Amino acid sequence: MQASVVRLEAAQPGMAAIGDSSQQILTELKRDAFLQTADFSTPYDAQAQQLPLGDEPLLVTDAQLSVQPNGSLQIIFQKKIGEAIQSCQLNLQAPLVHGMIHLIQQSVAKAEWNLLAPSTHLRADDERGTHTDPQNYKH
């Protein structure tokens, strides 16, 4: 997701000529600006009006990321068990991707999953973000 949000920010008008390191810095500045104005203190309202995937939460076993021509990041979360597949699709603009990354990082820390920082466990030639190190998950 980190690499995808950098690509989203780079696709903004007037950003095509910026180099990789400059684009990374600009993305971090935009992330910081978003996080300063984001509301993470309002409690989650669990009173759902509809449950299109059923009563049970979706246990994600697969995720697909795709930067769309309209400047959004399409994320498809899937639950694959045997031949059955359930999925949830999100189309997020860059600011919401920054927020989602922040929430995922907080959740990983709270779960004490002991995951390494993205730059330390991804191969540079692997754009899909496949982990090269084994993960330590807390049950």
Image (spheres, rainbow, N blue to C red):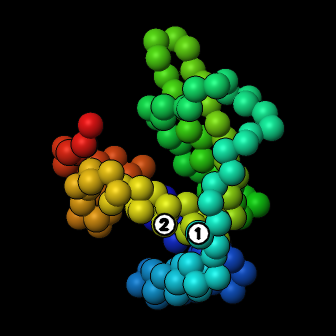
Please state if 112 lies on the left or on the right of 41 as rendered.
left
| Place of residue 119 in the rendered image (x, y in percent of width and height, measured from the top left) | 29, 67
Q: Is residue 57 above or below residue 36?
A: above
Q: Residue at x 50, y 61 (%)?
A: 103
Mark 2 against mark 1, which lies toward the viewer?
1
- Determine the image quadrant of residue 120: bottom left
- Determine the image quadrant of residue 44: bottom right
Q: Residue at x 68, y 58 (%)?
A: 92
Using the image, tell me which numbered label, if any, was put on residue 133: none
Q: Is residue 74 visible?
A: yes
Q: Which residue is mark 2?
A: 102
All told, the count of numbered labels is 2
Near-viewer residue (23 or 104): 104
Q: Residue at x 48, y 82 (%)?
A: 28
Q: Is residue 23 visible?
A: no
Label 1 secondary element: loop
Going by the numbered disc 1, the residue's amino acid type is: Phe
Near-viewer residue (101 or 107): 107
Q: Are the two marked residues, 2 and 1, in contact with CB atoms closer than 8 angstroms? A: yes
Label 1: few (<14), some or many (≥20) within 10 Å? few
Q: Which residue is mark 1?
A: 40
| Place of residue 135 in the rendered image (x, y in percent of width and height, measured from the top left) | 22, 45
| Place of residue 133 in the rendered image (x, y in percent of width and height, measured from the top left) | 19, 48
Label 2 secondary element: helix
Considering only order in the chain, which callout, 1 or 2, is on the residue closer to the N terminus?
1
Please state if 94 lies on the left or on the right of 106 as rendered.
right
